[in-house]
Image (spheres, grey):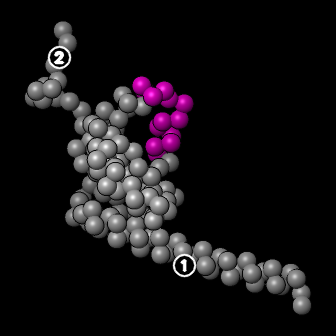
């Protein structure tokens, strides 16, 4: 037996298994997003399976608690709570890392007010008061 050939065959087998695992995980992600109703929303990017990791931004800790069980079942997804968001959003995790690296917790909170699902307050909102 040639060990180089055996090692090559073994590595090819592992690669095939990894490809099947990725395909099955993508099917899990599609099913998860379908259950959340993302197929009907036009604001959800359609190329999310090309992303290395998907960031799911949720508007409350209650929703996070309900969805967090899927984190262990599906690889490649992460969650963030943005209390300024009105609904669940998804983003490329690389975009999140790029925008939040080297930022303080306060800066990240301010960023979440208008980005990553955050909705800017308007003068029509009762909770918002204009400082003079």
Graded by Cα atoms within 10 Å as few (under 14), some (14 to 19) or many (20 or more), the crowding at tag 2 reads: few
Q: Residue at x 41, y 73 (%)?
A: 27
In the rendered view of the protein, which quadrant contains the N terminus? bottom right
Segment tinted magenta in the rendering:
95-107
Between 21 and 48, the one lying in front of the other is 21
Per the model, the C-alpha gap separating discs 1 and 2 is 55 Å
Q: Residue at x 48, y 27 (%)?
A: 104
Q: Position of residue 96 (x, y in %)?
A: 46, 43
Along the polypeptide, which appears first: circle 1 or circle 2?
A: 1
Q: Position of residue 5 (x, y in %)?
A: 83, 85
- Please indicate, yes or no, whether residue 51 appears anywhere in the rendered image: no
Residue 107 vertical position relative to residue 49 in the rendered view, above or below: above
Q: Residue at x 38, y 52 (%)?
A: 56
Residue 13 vertical position relative to residue 127 in the rendered view, above or below: below
In the rendered view of the protein, which quadrant contains the C terminus? top left
| Residue at the spot of label 2 | 130
Q: Would you say residue 37 sits in the magenta stretch?
A: no
Image-based side of 57 in relation to 10, left or right: left
Q: Residue at x 22, y 44 (%)?
A: 86
Image-based side of 41 in relation to 8, left or right: left
Between 62 and 77, the one lying in front of the other is 62
| Residue at the spot of label 1 | 20
Between 125 and 63, the one lying in front of the other is 63
- Picture quarter containing residue 34? bottom left
Does dot 1 land on a helix, a strand or a loop? helix
Q: Position of residue 14 (x, y in %)?
A: 67, 77
Residue 25 vertical position relative to residue 128 in the rendered view, above or below: below
Tell me the mark number nearer the camera, choosing from 1 and 2: 1
């Amino acid at each position: 037996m040639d060990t180089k050939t055996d090692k090559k065959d073994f590595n090819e087998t592992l690669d095939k298994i990894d490809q099947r695992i990725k395909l099955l995980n993508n099917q899990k992600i599609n099913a998860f997003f379908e259950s959340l109703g993302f197929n009907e929303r036009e604001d959800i990017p359609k190329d999310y399976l090309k992303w290395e990791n998907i960031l799911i931004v949720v508007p409350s800790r209650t929703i996070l608690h309900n969805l967090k069980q899927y984190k262990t079942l599906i690889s490649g997804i992460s969650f963030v709570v943005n209390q300024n968001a009105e609904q669940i959003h998804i983003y490329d995790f690389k975009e999140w890392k790029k925008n939040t690296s080297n930022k303080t917790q306060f800066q990240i909170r301010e960023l979440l007010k208008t980005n990553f699902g955050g909705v800017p307050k308007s003068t029509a909102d009762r909770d918002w008061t204009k400082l003079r």
